[in-house]
Image (cartoon, grey):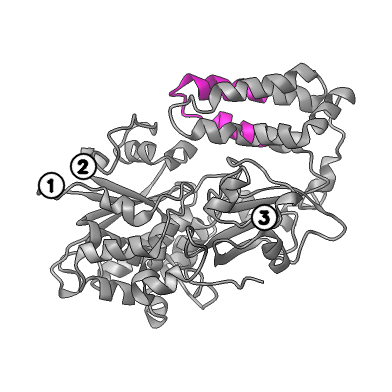
Amino acid sequence: MTDLTPVISATWGLERSWNFDTYCANGGYEGATKSLKMAPADIIQAVKDSGLRGRGGAGFPTGMKWGFLPAPDGGPRYLVVNADESEPGTCKDIPTMMNSPHTLVEGVIITSFAIGCNHAFIYVRGEVVHVYRRVMKAVQEAYDNGWLGKNIQGTGFDLDVTVHAGAGAYICGEETALLDSLEGRRGQPRLKPPFPAVSGLYARPTVVNNVESIASVPAILNKGVEWFASMGTEKSKGMGFFSLSGHIKRPGQYEAPLGITLRELLEMAGGMRDGHELKFWTPGGSSTPMFTDENLDTPLDYEGVGAAGSMLGTRALQIFDETTCVVRAVERWTEFYKHESCGKCTPCREGTYWLTQILHRLEAGHGTKADIDQLLATSDSIAGRSFCPFGDGAVASIVSSVKLFREEFERHVDEAGCPFDHAKSALFDYSTSADSLTGADSLTGADPLTDAEEANA
């Protein structure tokens, strides 16, 4: 049985874990203290040697990405933190910023020093106003205590950090669309090359990293490369968040070494809800091909999941039992992708629209078996042909669900409608009043943290 390895989440249970004093009392900024005494090239090499790979989904080696920046030319270079967490099922960066924002701030300081950046940006999803406030306060605390601004801790290094609230577009999770949005333009992917490392924010060399990637850096510099590399697998080193949601007893964040299996995670999470069994699950959010119970022992690392036919992605494990209609689940995901398409390229803009029409017909009992084949044909017209990876993600669940559950799609045709009772798959009793489920505040639109509460936090 693999044990959990709380590193980023180690202080989440402490009182006021988000405060500067609490963070420092538990080893905070020790990694930055060590790093500011090192040569920047040595920091980059340490991150390379640790084997840290991007935790935003692609899994590209973080230190190698930093090393792609061209030689300094006297002009500015930037670090941009992608905190625009939008993938359905993904919920690791928001709790990190809520519970321990200084872990991110410290990671920004170390990374900026390593790459020669004097102005970093944290791009937060605009709808999560409480998270935006929490990060803003952490940044201000860092300024007040000499960790940001001019001559940080007397080292001669200057760094300013801007926290930017996006307008809430899923496509801005794509790094070049995020950069366009940050520059004040409509968030749409750029043609590559040039890559951001050469021409990114304001046409200057830029590193774009996910929150979890940057938040992993302080521990590596503080505890050492060997400590980090001792966790995980040979090619997927370290720990990461596994976000379990759905039909399980204890959903939540499980920080564990890469290579752990769903069987082990389910045991930690109390298993499936009583009286039910696993039907299908996603290893990395809705944009990754789905798995079934045959993959319970698949190692959850980049190589293991890839070899099994899916992607590790953001490790958003959405878990569904036998009460779930796979057609309805895929229909709802595809509706999301249709709504969030930026519209720049025809495959996504038109293809996701037609996919939702076909899925609506099937779910409503008006479809034909030819529609099932058309789903695959339309998906094939999108995958690999869109301007950015959005298209591949939008069709991943469709292609994998037809492959695994074609007979269920055919039942919708043969029985002229969905054969499932959707109420049985619901996580809540929707006959209960909304007040008891969400609280009166959420019905009035009140923010989870008022200005007064945040000021006293």
- Residue 143 falls inside the magenta stretch: no
Report x, y in % for residue 336: 59, 35
Quadrant (top left/top right/bottom left/bottom right) for the C terminus: bottom left
Q: Earlier in the sequence, mark 1 or mark 2?
A: 1
| Residue with the mark numbered 2 | 204
Which label was assigned to residue 245? 3
Q: Magenta stretch: residue 342 in it?
A: yes
List x then y, in percent, for residue 381.
Answer: 56, 21
**Neighbour class for label 3 at 10 Å: few (<14), some, many (≥20)?**
many
Q: Label the magenta part by its dominant secondary structure.
A: helix
**Lateral position of residue 256 relative to residue 295, left or right:** left
Residues shaded magenta: 332-356
Q: Which of 318/169 is in front? A: 318
Q: Is residue 431 above or below residue 100?
A: above
Q: Nearer the viewer, residue 252 or 283?
A: 283
Q: Is residue 356 left or right of residue 369?
A: left
Task: Determine contact: label 3, label 1, CB under 8 Å.
Answer: no
Q: CB atoms at circles 3 and 2 under 8 Å apart? A: no
